Amino acid sequence: MKDKPNPVVRLLGSYGLCITLLLLLLILTFAGTWYQVEAGLFQAQKRYFESWGLIQHLGPLRIPLPGGMLVMGLLAVNLLFGGFVRIRKSARTAGVLIVHTGIAMLLLAGIVKQQMSDDGGVMLFEGESATHYQDHYHWEVAVRELEPVPSSGMLRSTGEWVVGEESFRKATADAPARLKAEGMPFDIWVRGYAANSQVMPKGPMWNSPFPVVEGFAIRAMEKSDQAEANFPALYAEITPAGSTSEVGGMPVLLWGMANAPAMYSIGGRSYAIDVRKKRYPMPFELKLIKFTKEDHPRTRMARVFSSHVEKITEGGESIPVHIQMNEPLRSGGVTVFQSSWGPENARPNTPLFSGFSVVRNPSDKWPEWSCWVIAFGMTLAFGPRLLKYLGKESMQRRRAAEGKVQ
Amino acid sequence: MKTFGMNLEPARTRLVLAGALLALSGLSACDSSNASGEMRRQAPTSVGRGEMVPAGVTPEMRFGSRSMTPPAGHDAAAAQGSHALPEFEYDLPDTWKQIARTDIRLLNFSVQGDSGATCYLSVLGGSVEGIRDNVDRWRRQFGLPAITDEELAGLPTLKLFGEVGPVVSASGPFADGMGGEIADAGLRGLIVHRGGALAFLKLVGPREVVGAEAANFDRFAESLNLPTAPTVEPSQSGASRLTVVAPPEWKVKDPGSVRLYSYEVGDGGDLSVMFLPGEAGGVPMNINRWRGQVGLDAAPEADLLAGERMTVLGEEGWWVDLEGSYKGMGTDVLVDKAGLIGVVVPMASETLFVKLAGPLDVVQAEKERVRAYIQSFQMGGQQ
C-alpha cells in the first residue's frame, strides 16, 4: 500500500495554491504598474517585485501583500511539486511536462536576471567612445591614479580603485567608513553621507550638517522617490595610508554632480577622487560615428533618431553597426538600445549626444526560448487531441453526408 | 484538495522540500550587502567623457553650474550662444574669497571664511528710478519701512563702475522672502544706474561681520572695474539698444526698475518687456513660471520646448499662449478669466521676455497686435 501524501506536499503542489499565487501576481503587477507612474521604475521594482512583503495603501485601508520574491518563489516550489514531482509521468503527460519546463525556464530567467544582470546607460557625442556604461541608480567612490599628458595641461588615468556605495552610505562623523586599498598610498575616511544633495557656496541663508570646505558645503535635500533624481554627496578626510581615524586629514567634498574630481597629491603622484555612478565593463568599445535625428515638421520633437556606431573588439577590429529604436546591438552578453538624445533645449547646429541604454543579462534570450519550449509542449499536449477532435468531426460530417445520400 | 497527481515517498518529499527551502533562502542571502571598505583595483575606465582631468582643478570648477557640453573641438560657444562673463578687475580684500558665480551673481564672494557672510554683484535692466525701489526692497528684508526722500538724499554715496550711487545700511532680523533668514544681520549695499541697467553690490551676513567688513566693502566697490567686457557692459545690453513701435492705443506706463517697457493694454491688460542676464533660469522654467501665474500645472520640459517658435531680433524664441485664473506673483486670484501671451527669447548673453497678461477677452483681442509689436523690435544699429 502506498503512503498517504504529506499534507504539506499536497498544499505546495496544489492547484489552489497555484491559482492563488497567479492571482497575487496579477494584483502585484497591477499595483506595481500604478505605483510606477508616481514613484518611477526603480522604486516600483524594489517595492512590488524584489520584496518579500509590503503594505498596500488603498484609500484608508492598509492591506498586507506578499512581495514578488515570495510569490514567485512559492510559484517555483508549487511548480516543482505539482508540475514535476507529483505529476504522472507517461507519454500522455509528456507535453504538459514540457510546458512546465518552459514555465520553470521563465522563472529561472527571472532569478538569473534579478541576481546577475545589471543595466545602465552611456551618452556619447560623435567621435567619443566608451568601454564602460553607468548604472542609473547606484554609486561608487573611485580613485584614479593620474599621469600628465605631455603639452596639454591635462592628466589621464593609469588605473583606478573603486568601491560601491554599500561601504560608505551609512558613514557618520562618529562611525566613519574607511576606504583603503593595497597599493593606494592614502585612506579615505568618509565622515558624512547625504543620499540627495547639492554642493554650493556656503551662504548665510542655510546650514550644512557637514563642515565647510573651501567655501563650499553640502546641502542635504529630501530623498526623491525617483531614485535617478538623487545625487549623493560625501564629506571625507584623506590621510596617509595606515593612519588611524583620530588623525585629522585633508577634508574634501565629493558630489555626484561635480564637474571635476577632488585632487590629492602624495609621493609625487596625483590622484583624482570621485563619487560617480557605478560603472560596468562592456565586452567591446562603443564609438559613436554619427547621430541622426529627424523632427516632426516645424517642431523640435524627435520623430525618429538613430546612431551609427563602431563596435571595436578586443582585437582592434571595428565593426559598423546601426542602432535604432527596437533594433539594438546585441553582442557579448550585453544589449545596447538607442534610448535618448540631448541636450533637449539645444539650439540649431548645437552638437547633440546620443543616449544608449545598456543591459547585461545572461538570461536575455531565455524568455524567448521558454516560449518556444512552451509552444512545443502545448502542441504535444493538445495537438493529438485537436487532431482527434478534427478527425471525429470529419467522420461525423461524412456520416451525415452519407445519411443524406441514402 | 485536488492535486496534480501521484503520491510521493516521504524521504523524497523531505529532500525536495529541503531543496526548495534552500533555494528560497538563497534568494534572500544574495541580497545582503558588502560592508567592506576595501577598494578594488582595475584598469582605466571610460564612459565617453570626463576621463581627462585638467591640472589645477579648483572648487569653483568642480561645483560651478553644470551642463552637458560637447567635447573639445566643437564650437560650443558659437553654437549655444556665448554666455561668457566679463573679466572684472578689482582689489580683493584678504578676508574675502571668490566662490562660484550663479545666473544672477556675476561676482560672488564668501567673507571671513565660514562666517556666513557673502558679498555679490548683480546687474539687471532698469531705469534710475529703480534705485529707490530696490533700496526699499532691501529695507523690507530687514522689516524697515520705505525710505523717505530726506533719508534717501542723506545716504552716503560710493562709486561703482564710475557711477555714483547710494550706500544702504541696515541691521536686525533679516528675511529675504525666499527662506533665507538671519536673526541678527547686517547689510551694506550699493546701487548705481548705468546705461539701461542697475548694478547691485550687496554685502549681507551676521551683523558683526558686516560691520567689520564695511571698509573692505567700500574699497572693493571703488576698485571694481569692467575694462574688457564690452559684451555685457550695461550700456551695451539689449535693454539700452532696443527700439520698439507700439500701437498708439496702448498707454505707456512707468516701467519701474526691472522692466524696459511697460504698457496698459485695453481694459486691464498689462504688457511688459524686460531683459534678464544670462539664461535667467532657462526657457522651460520661465514658461512654467508663467503657467503657474495663471494657475496651470508645470508642463514637461520636452513639451514646452516643442511649442510654437517665433523669431525675434534674429533669435529663436518660444511663443506662449495660456488661459486660466491670473494670480501674478501672489496667491490671490486677480483676474478670474485671464489670458497670458508672450515670448521668451534666449539671446547671446541675456534673455528677452515680452508678456501680456489680463482679462481673457482683452488678451485675445490684442494677440495679433502683440505679435506685430514684437516683430517691430530692433537693436540700435540694426537695419
Image: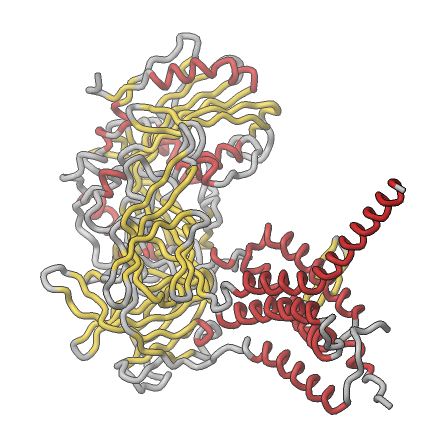
Q: Is residue A72 above or below residue A120?
A: below
- Residue at position x 25%, y 62% in the image: A317
Q: Residue A358 falls in which quadrant of the image? A: bottom left
Q: Quadrant of the C terminus of chain B?
A: top left
> Residue B215 at x, y = what percent?
24, 50
Query: Is A378 or A360 nearer to us in this picture?
Result: A378
* Image quadrant where one finds the N terminus of chain B: bottom right
Q: In the picture shown, does residue B287 fall above or below A206? A: above
- State the image coordinates of residue B365 (x, y, percent, origin top left): 51, 13
Tell me the quarter of the picture where residue B79 sits: top left
Q: Nearer the viewer, residue A252 or A19?
A: A19
Residue A2 % position (x, y): 84, 88
Taking the image as drawn, is residue B173 in sight? no
Say left or right for A289 vs B137: left
Q: Is residue A311 left or right of residue B254?
A: left
Asked whether residue A213 is in view, the answer is yes
Which residue is at 34% across, 60% downward?
Answer: A216
Identify the image's colour scheme: rainbow, by chain, secondary structure or one colour: secondary structure
* Residue for point 66% across, 61% down: A379
Q: Position of residue B3 (x, y in %)?
A: 81, 74
Task: Tell whether A124 sits left or right of A339.
Answer: left
Identify which residue, B182 or B171, lies in the foreground: B182
